[in-house]
Amino acid sequence: MQLHISNETNDTNKSYVVNKMIAYNLKHFPDDLKGRYQVVHLFLNDADGNIYGGLVGEICWNWLEVHYLFVESDYRKLGYGKQLLLEAERLAKAKKCDFIKLDTLSFQALDFYKKQGFEVFGTLPNAGTHVHYYLKKDLK
């Protein structure tokens, strides 16, 4: 049999790869961490349900990973980003996470994250002419 690589959007195939990777990973984690997965979606809405930002991430085993944090420019520097991170941290602590990890680019929010207690643990230069920062905040 000969295999070939295809480049296509296919949710069935994507699910196959993700589920197989999760199953493989589960063999290597202690039993008390298995099944500890939760999608985290926190949104900034007004009374009419209009959205002005939010945080999207996931709790996986013993950490929370923030994939996206966004606040509309008119509402920045008013504490909403900090509130979103604090709520995510509250959820992570309730799920007994040891740390939160996230990444940001040099033109985004590095100083903001540092003010919230995150520390840089890695960088990649020349990420679209910017620096890509990887940050972590210990919860214990």
Image (spheres, rainbow, N blue to C red):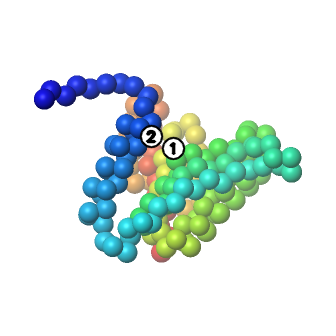
SS label for mark 1: strand
Q: Left of 80 or right of it: where is 24?
A: left
N-term-proximal mark, 2 vs 1: 1
Give me the disc on residue 132. 2
Q: Which amino acid is tagged 1?
A: Thr
Q: Residue at x 81, y 47 (%)?
A: 49
User: Farthest right residue?
Assistant: 47
Q: Left of 89 or right of it: where is 60?
A: left
Q: Residue at x 52, y 71 (%)?
A: 95
Q: How many numbered tags mark residues here? A: 2
Locate residue 119, reporting x and y percent. Answer: 47, 58
Locate residue 135, reporting x and y percent. Answer: 46, 53
Relative vertical location of residue 52 with respect to residue 100 in this rendering, above or below: above
The N terminus lies in which quarter of the figure? top left
Q: Residue at x 44, y 49 (%)?
A: 134
Foreground residue among 6 and 90:
6
Relative vertical location of residue 41 with respect to residue 109 in this rendering, above or below: below
Q: Are marks 2 and 1 in contact (CB under 8 Å)?
A: yes
Give me the disc on residue 104. 1
Q: Left of 1 or right of it: where is 31?
A: right
Locate residue 83, reporting x and y percent. Answer: 69, 59
Relative vertical location of residue 27 with respect to residue 1 in this rendering, above or below: below
